[in-house]
Amino acid sequence: MNKVVELQENIKNHLKEIIQSIGHLDDDFEVILETPKEKENGDYATNCALQLTKVFRKAPKIIAQNIVDKFDCYEYNVEKIEIAGPGFINFFIKKIFLTTIIKEIITLDTEYGKSSIGNNEKINVEFVSANPTGDLHLGHARGAVIGDALCRILEKAGYDVTREYYVNDAGNQIHNLALSTISRYEQQLGIESKMPEDGYFGQDIIEISKELIAKYQDKYLEDTKERYELFKDYAKKYELNKIKKDLADFNVNFDVWSSEQALYNDNKVDRAIDKIKAKGYIYEHDGAVWFKSTAFGDDKDRVLRKSDHTLTYLTPDIAYHIDKLERGYDKLIDILGADHHGYVPRLKASIECLTGDQDKLEVIIIQMVKLLKNGVEYKMSKRSGKAITIRDLIEEVGVDATRYFFTMRSSDSQMDFDMDLATKKANDNPVFYAQYAHARICSIMRQREEKNYHFDLIDEYNLITSEKAMEILKYLAEFPLVVAQSALKRAPNIIVNYINNLAQAFHSFYNSEKVIDELDISKTNQMLALVKATQITLRNSLNLIGVSAPQKM
RNA sequence: GGGGCGUUAGCUCAACCGGAUAGAGCAACGGCCUUCUAAGCCGUCGGUUAGGGGUUCGAGUCCCUUACGUCCCGCCA
């Protein structure tokens, strides 16, 4: 906890003591200290007097006055304290105190922003998990970006994070992938062959068939089990490798790739059914095996084993979640597309049934992305072969811009992705605003080296006093709190807002005062330290959303 | 019919546990490069927070309701 954050905590505790001393003994009462929107309203403000009107049966301003009378300004580095509006208490912190953050940031460097609110809790974040049957599209890209940013943020906030991708390498869609590959293979060899109705019509399947021909020529024209298995595995691997490469190029990396097929191989799927059965929530009806999920809040019971004895998608997925929990995670987070939200209650029902605690699973729903091209909606379809893929985004829009664009929106609002805007007008993208601030600082630092100025790590920077500089300092100091809040709310977009605010504060500062003043060496040294601290914080915050911090632009 | 998410400035979106005068960017308009990067800064314009009701000292935020958009409601995955 840095000194500024510590001060906030101390002020809160002090206020609570005062409130208790004047008669409100409720230990659960929490004093809220917030940063007012308007600068005139101080560095921090509390509404506690307003909240206490009912307890004390007095006007809020009188209560506020009672509190203010007892407040020890000297001890808490408060320069001025005042009562404003309906009864807010506003605190103005001594400027010199805010500058103590500079030394701390420079000392911590890449570590700055860390906190321990996560308490090393083991948390598993599963995201993307697209079927290995084609390219990752726009929706996957959004999920990938938000999932990855969330993981980075959780780690910074002190969680022990595992990034996991669940590969659906069994089931119907893989069957169709195999049939599609066989069909393309035959077509490439000049044989008339019909694609399956639910087949995959993308260019990638044709590529796979070409590779198979290069490898085996026309050896597999006969319809055999061997051919089916071989082509299936080949296509699966091809698609999965492509996904892995696309994600890696998108700056998204996973710790664990879990296979659905492996769950079958290890007999974990049958065991999952047995476990539910042992709890007494399995019954048979119309020749199928059902899970009585309505007992756990689902709106209808779910089939686990169909009357043709094959399993539904849900069954291995239950086994998968049980497996994750057995691997020792305190919490599972699934990041799912909005089209799967109806699936959540049944999954949670299974967790509730088997562990008695459905809150072990947390689901983040990512709303749909609508693609616009030339002003009209461009339907995404994995099978049309015409959809915009994650690869297209990397090449046409760029990794940084795409990541920034997806992260800046809250995951529960739908968004339009305007292809023309994202590509043609790339320079207007807000990501450049933040990166530019960083590049400007780097430029100052280059000058520093040329002119051989240094900045010493002193405790108090007495020559930094301007309003613009104070604005920056306040943002710098709250960074660890912002990260913590972003982690707790599972909301990476909070970081983007923060980056924007900090960049703005810096640009404004930059335009109003010179950092390097050749006539005032000691002030220059102090200003350089402030700028350095800003650079570190900008870079660390950009890093949380996987966006680069360029030296030059 | 049931449910999830959304509806805030012309457009795209913010708004911390219910707080003070609802903020940014884009667009429009007017200024600022002899000075560390003008991909920037400063200013102007822009709002019945979809409509209605309720809760209270106080509501964009909580509750009810209506409308609209979107997604889901399978022994598909």
Image: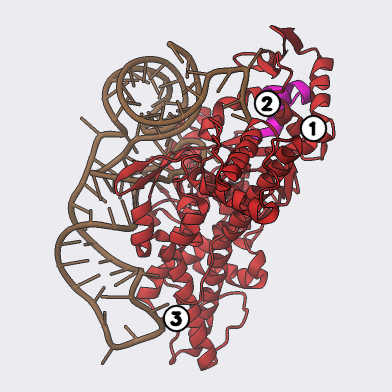
Chain colours: A red, B brown
Q: Are marks 3 and 2 on the same chain?
A: yes
Residue type beneath disc 3? Val
- In depth, the one of A442 and A144 nearer the eye is A144
Where does the magenta region start and end? A349-362
Q: Residue at x 72, y 47 (%)?
A: A257
- In depth, the one of A119 and A472 nearer the eye is A119
- In depth, the one of A244 and A198 nearer the eye is A198
* Count of all numbered marks drawn on residues in the image: 3
Q: Earlier in the sequence, mark 2 or mark 1?
A: 1
Spatial CA span between label 3 and label 2? 60 Å
The residue wearing badge 1 is A264
Q: Residue at x 45, y 85 (%)?
A: A516
Q: Earlier in the sequence, mark 1 or mark 3?
A: 1
Residue type beneath disc 1? Tyr
Q: Are marks 1 and 3 on the same chain?
A: yes
Q: Are marks 2 and 1 on the same chain?
A: yes
The residue wearing badge 3 is A515
- Marked residue chain, label 1: A
- Residue at the extreme top of the image, as rendered: A286
A359 in the magenta segment: yes
In front of the other: label 2 or label 1? Answer: 1
- Marked residue chain, label 3: A
Marks 3/2 in contact by CB < 8 Å: the verdict is: no
Q: Position of residue A18 (x, y in %)?
A: 59, 43
Q: Is residue B4 above or below residue A17?
A: above
The residue wearing badge 2 is A314
In front of the other: label 3 or label 2? Answer: 2
Label 1: state its secondary structure. helix
Q: Position of residue B14 (x, y in %)?
A: 43, 46
